[in-house]
Amino acid sequence: MRKTEFLGEAAALLFPVDWPEPFGLVMEAMACGTPVLAFRCGPIPEVIDDGITSTLLDSEEEAIATLPGILTYDRHAARQRFEERFTSARMVKDYVSTYHKLLRARAANGKAQSTWARRLDGGDVLTPRVEAAAASLFRALRTGRTPVESPWY
């Protein structure tokens, strides 16, 4: 059985890690719409929505007591929250938004723009390599696929 099937078909992910461990498995469970029971440790409190799509725990006893309740969590809401916060498409949109803000601030300060900045602001001068990178980025925004996932690369 593949990991995504395993996590996707699980009623919940019990993640009783009590050290500052990376949160990859938690993210994978959330991507599958699987609610998570996890100790309040490391980056976990920043990743899950306590009481909404997952539950933060402080003890094993609390995990046992909370388990029946987490089985009622809305799996579609868990997946939707993952989409809103953690997908590559969302991150690409945030990067582009930040680049535009920086370009506007630079223009407002009267500083000269590079050819890349002029292109983003509507200019027409780019090297072929930068043009290809820009095209990939904007294609990712339109399709929801990141440049890395794109067969274009």
Image (cartoon, rainbow, N blue to C red):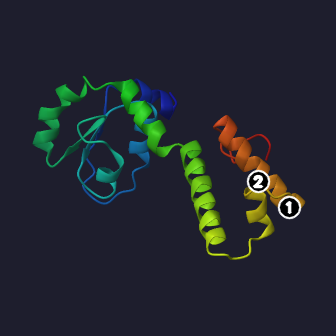
Pointer 1 local density, CA inside 10 Å: few below 14, some 14–19, many at least 20: some
Name which residue lies at 76% across and 48% down. 136
Name which residue lies at 66% across and 69% down. 107
Left/right placement of residue 112 relative to residue 69 reads: right
Residue 86 lies, in percent from the top left, at 48, 45
Dividing the picture into quadrants, the one containing residue 77 is: top left
Name which residue lies at 41% across and 30% down. 33
Mark number displayed over residue 7: none
Pointer 2 local density, CA inside 10 Å: few below 14, some 14–19, many at least 20: some
Residue 10 lies, in percent from the top left, at 36, 27
- Residue topped by disc 2: 134
* Position above or below: 37 against 10: below
Residue 16 lies, in percent from the top left, at 25, 46
Left/right placement of residue 25 relative to residue 38 reads: right
Left/right placement of residue 115 relative to residue 61 reads: right
Sequence-wise, the earlier of marks 2 and 1 is: 1
* Position above or below: 4 against 24: above
User: Which one is in front, 134 or 29?
Assistant: 134
Q: Amino acid at mark 2?
A: Ala
- Residue topped by disc 1: 126
Label 2 close to label 1 by CB (< 8 Å): yes
